[in-house]
Amino acid sequence: MPTPAIETRDLTIRFGGHVAVDAVSCAFHAGTLTAIVGPNGAGKTTYFNLISGQLPATSGTVHLDAADISHLSAAARARRGIGRAFQITNLFPNLSTLENVRLATQSRARSRAGAAHGLAGTLRELTSRWDRDTAVRSRALDYLAEVNLAEKRDVPVVALSHGDKRKLEVALMMALEPHVFMFDEPTAGMSVDEVPVVLDLIKRLKARGDATILLVEHKMDVVRSLADRIVVLHNGRLVADGAPAEVIASPIVQEAYLGIAPTKAVEAALHG
Amino acid sequence: MSGIADTLLSGDLPRSRILTALLGVIVGVLALAPLLFDGAQAINTAAKICVFIVLAASYDLLLGYTGIVSFAHTMFFGLGAYGVGLALYGWGATWTSVAAGLALAIVAGLALALVIGLVSLRVKAIFYAMITLAVASAFAILAGQLSDFTGGEDGRSFRVPELLRPATLLFRLPLLNIDITGRTAAYYLVAGSAAGLFLSALRVVNSPFGRVLQAIRENEFRAEAIGFDVVTYRTLGNCLAAVMAVFAGALYALWLRYVGPDTTLSFGIMLDILLMVVIGGMGTLYGAIIGATLFILAQSYLQKLMGAAAKSTQGIPVLPDLLHPDRWLLWLGVLFVLSVYFFPAGIVGTLRSRAVTQEQLPKT
């Protein structure tokens, strides 16, 4: 077995007496798409926050390519290649769509320079003109085009529709050029004709073969068509892990996902 | 021509015809002030405006661009003034003293800004404001108490290098018959440095670094999530603003040939800067020019204007009392309330957004 791209070992977070994520150990490999499912409040987004560093774990560790990154800030983890698209849209509201993505490509250019950035790089960052960095700008335009937002490059985020914001959210993550892509309900609240834009993007990403993709998604048809593997969280615990067909059929999932077991209700929920 | 302006202003043009005209008038008058005005008060006011444009711009770097509410900004202003002032007082009226005093003040300012930043920029905004308030008060008290060193509440008067002394006659302008004295040289040192500092600040806010600061102001959480170390950027922004305030203080000391708590460290000045930035428009460095100019003009001339108004309304009941020069603070207050009411985004912010709406009207 190759080294997992991302691995969590006994990852736990406690909020007061409530254990939101409870000793979750799980490994994710490059070139695979894992769907993380579970009822509302199961701890899926909290689990994501622990991996990408928005929340510090109470105990347990997160590993990126075998290196322990538990002590790193969210910014450092992003620079190391963990990309995150948020469930609740989380953008720079008064900046244009292009500016939003440009900030991500700027960050990417900086982290790519790495140590070479140095003092000279800092000085350049302070004294050069942002509007003259055409490389960063054109790369940002490419990523905007990938989510069909190129024509709206000058529109401030506050003036975008919900669907466009969701697409921009994804574009920001793509622009960071990460190895690990964490999608948190990327299509939630999108209109029917917008959903394929994001799904196609995820499919293209998967076809690339080297990306580690984690997807939190409620729509079961989406999960079925995309996922190589499904991980089920329930009350903060990992309760099932395996191939999609097998996991969906397992009684523990049917109970965890719906709180009740009747097979008909499950089928109705999955297809309806 | 427009290419030069674009380079000088780092591509951040005023973007409003009224604003361009206003700025043109202010900059033009400030540039020619020694030739236009005779009296000491006018030229003092002009120099004070130059200094406070730099100070307000540096504060806007914090408040408007980074979203940091700090009450310690006069501390850095004071550091610059005391650095240069005490160096000139103690080590003699030479340029070496000026340079050494300024260098020491910059180092001290950077160190303080760094410490305050690293210790407290992680905490919530309100706590940060409180911490800066405490540090600034401590600094002001220290400056007042160490009277052997700082001159205490009385401050220190000192001599400046010969080139800048009023008694130095440099040359006489042949056509206009105006004496160019050391005072004029001092004015142009202040005005020229202010212009250089302002344009540098304009470059910084329009640099990739400046865009990250604005991103942090917009959404700190997301800025962190796309890989920017928020604390590092904020601390660096804090340090830059501090150094700029140190420069402003140094210029002020050179101009006044005096340094004391009342001219640089008082909480009143802190509030003045805050008002200048808010009235001019936060997050637009041009706002610092408009805000500082309006504020200092009002401060310097409102009393005179009211004196004249009170005289001319004599005989009418109540009015002369209302317009009595002693009530000038009341009217200054009224002016501020009105300006915030009519220009909620500050004068520059409102003018710019109006210009944008007008541009878009014909298209739709």
Image (spheres, rainbow, N blue to C red):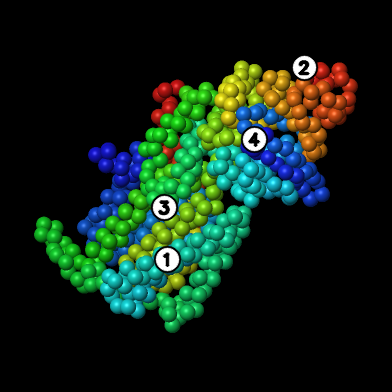
Position of A209 with respect to B334 (left or right) is: right
State which quadrant residue B349 falls in. Answer: top left
Chain under numbered label 1? B
Say yes or no: labels 3 and 1 on the same chain: no
Q: Residue at x 57, y 66 (%)?
A: B134
Measure the alpha-carbon separation of dots 4 and 3: 38 Å
At 45% from the left edge and 52% from the top edge, which residue is drawn?
B61
Q: Position of residue B89 (x, y in %)?
A: 34, 77
Is there any visible trace of residue B124 in the rendered image? yes
In this rendering, the label closer to the viewer, 2 or 4: 4
Q: How many marks?
A: 4
Residue picked out by circle 4: A2
**Res. B107 mark:** 1
**First in residue order: circle 2 vs circle 4:** 4
Tell me, yes or no, whether dots 2 and 1 are on the same chain: no
Q: Secondary structure at mark 3?
A: helix
Residue drawn at 18 percent across, 64 percent down: B180
Q: Secondary structure at mark 4?
A: loop
Amino acid type, residue under disc 1 in the picture: Val
Cα distance in 3D space between marks 3 and 2? 58 Å
In the image, which is nearer the foreground, mark 3 or mark 1? 3
Residue to which mark 3 is pinned: A119
Q: Secondary structure at mark 2?
A: loop
CA gap, disc 4 and disc 1: 52 Å
At x 40% / y 64%, what residue is drawn? B106
Where is residue B58, by image quadrant? bottom left
Q: Mark 3 is on which residue type?
A: Leu
In the figure, is residue A80 to the left or right of A32?
left
The image quarter in which residue A42 lies: top right
